[in-house]
Amino acid sequence: MSNRNKRRILVVDDEITVCKSIRQAILSDEYEVDMALSGEEALKKDRENPYDLIITDLMMPGISGLDLLKTLREARPDVNVIMVTGYPTIKTAVESVKMGAFDYLPKPFTPADLRGLVARAFKKAEGEDRGKGAVAGARIPAGYYYMLGHTWLKVEDKDQATVGVVPDFLKTVGIITQLELPKVNEVITQGNICGKISDADHFVHRIWSPASGRVIEVNARLVADSSVLRRDPFQNGFLFRIETGNLEEDLKGLLLAK
Amino acid sequence: MNLHRNVQKFFDLPLRMKFVLSFLVVVLFGGLVSLFFGLRLEHRTIFSLAQAKVRHDLASAWMVYDEKLNDIRDIVLLNARRDSIQAALLADDRETLFRTLVRVRRDFNLDILTITDRFGKVVQRTNRPDVFGDDQSADPLVSRALRKETVTSTEVVPRPELLKESPDFAERAYLKFIPTPMAAPRPEDHEENGLMLKGAAPILDEQGKVLGILYGGILLNQNYDIVDRVKEIVFKGEKYKGKEIGTVTIFQNDLRISTNVIDAEGNRAIGTRVSQEVHDAVLRRGVPWVGRAFVVNHWYITAYEPIKNIAGEIIGMLYVGMLEKPYIDLRNSVMLTFTGIAALCTVILLIILFFITSSITNPLRRMVLATNRIAQGDLNHQVRIGARDEIGQLAHSFNQMTENLKLANENLIQWGKTLEKRVEERTKELREMQDYLLQSEKLRSLGKMAAGVAHEINNPLTSILINTHLMLEKLEKRHDFYENLSLIADETERCTQIVKGLLEFARQNPPQKTYTSINELIERTTQLLENQASFQNVRIVKELDPSLPAIKLDRNKIQQVFWNLLLNACEAMPKGGLLTISDALSADQKSIEVRFTDSGVSIPKENVNKLFDPFFTTKSSGTGLGLAVSYGIIQQHDGKIEVKSEVGRGTVFTLSFPVEDHSPNSAQKGGTHE
């Protein structure tokens, strides 16, 4: 694959070591990886020569990751951005998804985690290229809350809700080989992992929980047959039911389908 | 100065003593004064009465005396007028005269009866007829009779004249002086003249010519007719303690010649003489004397008056005396009665005074005692005084004061206790608050630090993790370093988990509180636990109160706390045991208390306080954040978490959650959704 066809990725982090490590992790024949040590530098580089994917740290001196995302999206609304974040800034990460980031990845992570995510990002980009104009959110039923490109939350009762995966997410995932779901009674928090999907490409994709709460029911049908996930993502293909813990606050971090 | 000191001493005496002394002084003074005036009054009345009586008696004596004289006068007068006597005189018939006159003298108890011629020469004597012819015209009475007067008088008769009449008379008149103290001195030591009542009357013929003189008399010396008669008439023989009360004496000059005063031997006390004082007054100055006098051997109230002869010369005294003894005894008995009554009254008054002062001083003493006891702090003491007088009122006021004092004191003590209790409570609260704040502050700063560390450590961890994995990807599994690298990767993952735990702990998410049944939460949590293999040997006993109200809780967080406590308890009993979970309303109904009691290994004392510190753990695995996080959560619920651990009894964790209100609406509102 010539340089011309290689996907161009920009890694932004104020720490050179982290930049280098990330670059090392994803560097391959398919990807050409550049590095920027600040938001300003990243903007400058992207302006000169736009990247297919930008992986940026959320917490940076000067222009923060979130500012960078905003600025980038102002120029190119379809820009593909993955936010790298520390645990304390998960909330900000969730917000960044709401603002249009493709996804986020909490530190520390393994090369595999990152690669899976990067792969999904490009898959999504490919899909969008194919079906132009199709807005992901349009297919989500009204009244459903969702994390853009990830999971949905349907509030069933004052303190109960079901959680599922939006089709957009599934599109970025290959053939599902394994579905890992939380156990009943497990406590999950918004923006944190609540399940994993392994695909045929050996990528493990994390599923972010759209809300905090305690799992009170796991979709048994799904455990038996994961294909329901694709067939009926909003009804029978739900992942689990939770008893919400902090719903009001959580809803602020989600989008509402109309 | 001395007086002042004594007055001071007096005022220092006990009250009763003062009363008694003052009273005694007044009574004694009054008694003495009244005795003095009483005696004077008595003296004046009794003695003046006695003196008046004795004066009167003397007058009576004079009457007897004068009567005797009159008798003599009548005898001589009547016989001088007898014709037979005139005829015999004229005829100088001495024989007839003698016979007639002797009969007359005997009939009328005269001592002498003598007839003279017209010149005063004795014609015939009735005692000694052989002595006659002597001239009696010099005799004052005879000479007056010669001048045709009939006269009587008391006269001193010299011894020769007595001898002429009869030697018996001279013998009767002769009296040796008995030495008498207080008597006026006299050169003689005896008396030989006599004292005689005499009367003389002229014998006249028909022409009134004096033919002769008839004169008679009674010799008073040792003649007791008059004195005894007076005594009989005046005193009626009254006696006092065997002694004659009244005595009568005729003195010749100052010599007792006829008396019924008895001397020590029981004889009539003739021959003794009058005292100088009386002698001077009566014999010298011729004035009567009335007063006390010591007569022979007793005190008498006496009256003396002079006896004068016809020429007016004082020749003797007539005396009347009343024994003073009865008056003295009367006075003494009066005095004694007076004194006795006074003494009796004093004693009675003293007794009354004793009771009165007792009624004053006893209550006072009791009050003094009470004051002392109250001063010593015994406020329960009451003064019991029945009387309603001023002291009773004082005691009443005093009791009231004590009562008030006691009340005030009790209030003070109560206040003190309350204050103490409040201070204790506040101190406890403060200490708890301090602990709480300390723990909160510790947690907060630790949280901050943890967040900072976590963030800072994340980047290096990221690099390590990525690079390790990159290296692993490139190595064959058989490679020498593969295992080492895997270990690094795993441990880095562990670091990630620790950091995650730290951040979880540091995260201060506000709790999402909904009305929840504690019982339900406990049930759910234990259900979870029962599936865990590690707790197979732990028996769980639930003692839940079904009537507990629902309270607002963050269900997830509290469940996390329960979970942590359950895990802790089970880990403390690796070989199995009993875990008791109980809940109930607190005693004051203001909170719900949940207890987790295990029968496992107790926590050493020094560890109890560190239990809630982050990173404190006794386990080799685990972050030591479980209880710290639980603490933070309970704090967010305004609750409390406490641990008690005793060796051999295991450990009790007590959680308490405040109950906001008891409105029935809030109960079970949280509901369950199973």
Image (cartoon, rainbow, N blue to C red):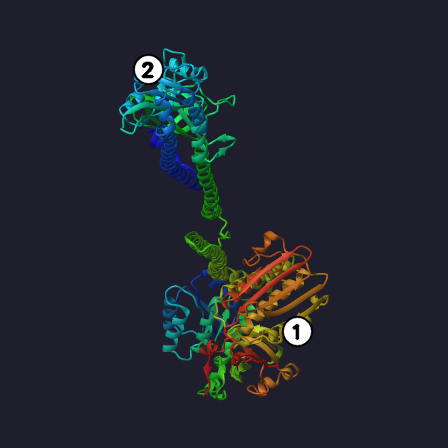
Which mark is in front, 2 or 1?
2
Residue nearest the viewer, comparing B357 with A215: B357
Provide the secondary structure element on which disc 1 rests. Answer: helix
Q: Position of residue B129 (x, y in %)?
A: 43, 17
Q: Which residue is mark 2?
A: B135
Residue nearest the viewer, comparing B19 with A161: B19
Q: Earlier in the sequence, mark 2 or mark 1?
A: 2
Q: Quadrant of residue B581?
A: bottom right
Q: Position of residue B386 (x, y in %)?
A: 49, 55
Residue B493 left/right relative to B88: right
Q: Amino acid at mark 1?
A: Gln
Residue extending furthest front?
B91
Q: Are discs 2 and 1 located on one and the same chain?
A: yes
Task: Please rate how many residues cluster around mark 1, counting C-alpha atoms within 10 Å: few if below 14, some from 14 to 19, many from 20.
Answer: few
Q: Which residue is mark 1?
A: B527
Provide the secondary structure element on which disc 2 rests. Answer: loop
- Residue located 64% across and 84% down the image: A221
Q: Please, which chain is the residue tagged with disc 1 on? A: B
Q: Quadrant of the N terminus of chain B?
A: top left
Q: Is residue B303 above or below residue B607?
A: above
Residue nearest the viewer, comparing B511 with B410: B410
- Residue located 45% across and 18% down the image: B172
